[in-house]
Amino acid sequence: MVPVCLVTAVLALGPWQQLRAQSRTQGAAKGALIGGLIGGGMAGVVAAIQYSKDRDFAVTPSRLSFEAAQPGSHIEKIVTIRNRATDRLSVQVSVRGDSFSLVDRADEPLTLQPGGRAELRVRFAPARRGSASGSLEIHHTKGRQKSAKRTSVSLTGRGLSP
């Protein structure tokens, strides 16, 4: 059986307008939705396409690329997590990579109510010159489930010469 996926396309129609098209699809049907939006005269205006196999949980964006920074300085970016389930989600977040950290977030589990969302601020603070990579690891459980599902956000950055 092919897993059902949720595809969300956000189309920028003008400076203050957006059109959201959402479809629960199977397999190639998700490509047809996106292709229909782009092929239907919307080429070049697709602002964001979010695709997730997990219908209960969404993470935006799926990767963060930080601008180059001097050692001793830092840059911060936001990752948004959303609960699309009808039950609450318990979320545990951790960061891998020496140059990356979470700002203002305790290690304790975060609870997201149905329809709720949270913003995680990720900091890139290079200690030395060169490329840096890491990941934001997000584990979540729905309701009374015992096993956690994992989502990973890729993190990259570059430290400049002092």
Image: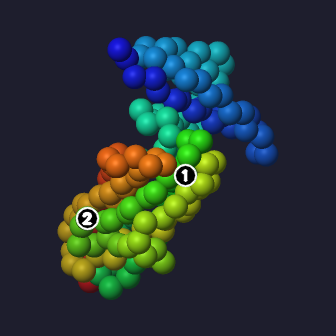
* Callouts 1 and 2 close, C-beta under 8 Å: no
Q: Answer above or below: position of 70 versus 158.
A: below
In which quadrant will I find the C terminus? bottom left
Q: Nearer the viewer, residue 108 or 26?
A: 108
Residue at 53% in and 29% down: 7
Q: Secondary structure at mark 1?
A: loop
Q: Residue at x 56, y 46 (%)?
A: 87
Which residue is label 2 attached to? Answer: 96
Quarter-wise, where is residue 38 in the image?
Answer: top right
- The spot of residue 5 in percent (x, y) is 47, 27
Is 14 drawn above or below residue 116 in the view shown? above
Q: Earlier in the sequence, mark 1 or mark 2?
A: 1
Q: Which residue is mark 1?
A: 88
Mark 1: give few (<14), some (14-19) or many (20+) Cα within 10 Å: some
Residue 123 in view: no
Q: Amino acid at mark 1?
A: Arg
Badge 2: few (under 14), some or many (20 or more) residues near its Cα, within 10 Å? some
Please, which colouring scheme is shown? rainbow
The percent position of residue 107, horizontal first and vertical second, equals 38, 73
Residue 151 vs 1, above or below: the answer is below
Horizontally, residue 68 falls left or right of residue 8, namely left
Q: Residue at x 76, y 45 (%)?
A: 15
- Quadrant placement of the N terminus: top left
Query: Which residue is at the front of the view, 12 or 58?
Result: 58
Q: Amino acid at mark 2?
A: Arg
Disc 2 secondary structure class: strand
Looking at the picture, tell me which residue is in the foreground, 73 or 58. Answer: 58
Q: Nearer the viewer, residue 107 or 21?
A: 107
The quarter of the picture where residue 53 lies is top left
Q: Nearer the viewer, mark 1 or mark 2?
A: 1
Across and down, in percent, residue 22 comes to: 62, 28
**How many circles with numbers are drawn on the protein?**
2
